[in-house]
Image: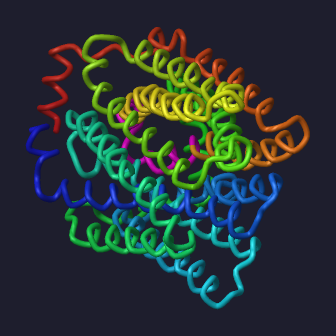
Amino acid sequence: MSTSSVTSANFRRFWFGQTLSQFGAKIGTLGLSVTAVELLNASTRQVGILGAASTVCYLLIGLPAGAWVDRLLKRKTMMWAALTRCVTILVIPLLWLAGDLRIEVLYVVAVVVGVASVFFDVAYQSYVPVLVPEEAIGAANARLEATAQISTLGGPALAGLLMRVVSAPVVMLVDAVAYLISFLSLSVTKDAEQNPSPTSEVKRNLLSDIGEGLRFVRDQPVIRRLTVSMGVSNFFATLVFTLVPILIMRTIGFDSFMLGLVMTCGAAGGVLGALLAPKARQRFSVGTVMSYGLLTAALFTVANPVAVILAPHSKVLAGAALLLGEFGLTVGALLFNVTQISLRQTLCPKHLLGRMNASIRFVVWGSMPLAALVAGWLGSTIGVAATLWVGVIGSVATVLPILTIDRLMPSPPSATEAQERETAL
């Protein structure tokens, strides 16, 4: 049943749409950064503000978005989010051609795309258990994460190459097309989800729905620890990621092609990590896989400040450090991510999936705008390299909340309980 679920034409349509959405997100992230740094000559603080604008929506509307997603059809929510991102991204090349592109426009575009991304991501992470049976969730997530990484292998490198010929805003057209095709692909995906209609007994207001999701995350011991770990991890990952374009194109002196190459190398590591996750899970406990994944990611983050040390002596060695570091970082990150997503979806009741995912995103992604602002402030105060070392030290701490998480895992049902459950269904 699991195999047929994840190899059916219907799943492939959803798979294709999600892959293109990830492809668009990678192109858009690179395009916004390069447009700000190269064309608009943005300062370190402005780059930090741009990073905050891209993620502040998770803090502002993350919680109500989860409650709304649980009240809406998830596939249609993803469709409209993809279409919104497509139309918004088109503003950048149009204003650039008109000669009226300013950094403030990038802030607004980042916010609108971020809002649409909140709805898309919460719906997407809540949709997999609707589309496939429980025993296929792990396989489905592994395939989705692997191909999301594969889709970005050529994306950033292609964007970097195109930026040598045309300006970054023109490359944003590719981003818009990816979102449009994602919309069309999702429009032909089929599912049996019905629009939730509250009965007289369960009519809830928005605040009650949000509170229920928050309480579940707070009271479920495994998910609570995961949330703390991911919140710390995303803060320091954002601290590093915000400064990577400045590190590569200003501090070391590479061009936008190198930035795209580094991101592509990271995507290759992500493919490996996503493919290794199911096999690692068969041999080791969930806690072990997630802990080693986070530690691997943290240790490879060292490559960024090390590249600064190497650059004056050899730009070749500095470039190699950046490529190797991004590859190893994403291997570890995907080992952790595939495992924790499947674990969350298994532990959470289906009617709470949207609110559970949104509550976690509120904490985890809500730290990112603060981290982006801190990165801009620290980068201009103590320097880019010193700030990156702060990111390295903080990344190591992300593993602490999940070191003993296996002790909190619920026991699997006995054969009798499983048979009774199947009979009841």
Image quarter of the C terminus: top left
Q: Is residue 351 magenta?
A: yes
Q: How is the image coloured?
A: rainbow
Q: In the image, is residue 419 above or below residue 359?
A: above
The stretch of residues the image draws in magenta is 343-360
Which of the 4 quarters of the picture holds residue 74? bottom left
- Give the dominant element type of the magenta stretch: helix, strand or loop: helix
Which of the 4 quarters of the picture holds residue 396? top right
Q: Is residue 345 magenta?
A: yes
x%, y% of residue 291? 49, 16
x%, y% of residue 401? 61, 18
Q: Residue at 76% across / 64% down in the picture?
A: 41
Q: Residue at 63% across / 53% down in the picture?
A: 58
For the image shown, how many numbered marks are present on the structure?
A: 0
Q: Residue at 50% across / 34% down in the picture?
A: 323
Nearest the camera: 217 or 393?
A: 393
Point out the residue furthest to the right here: 381
Direction from residue 164 to residue 58 in the image, left or right: right
Is residue 358 shown to the viewer in this render?
A: yes
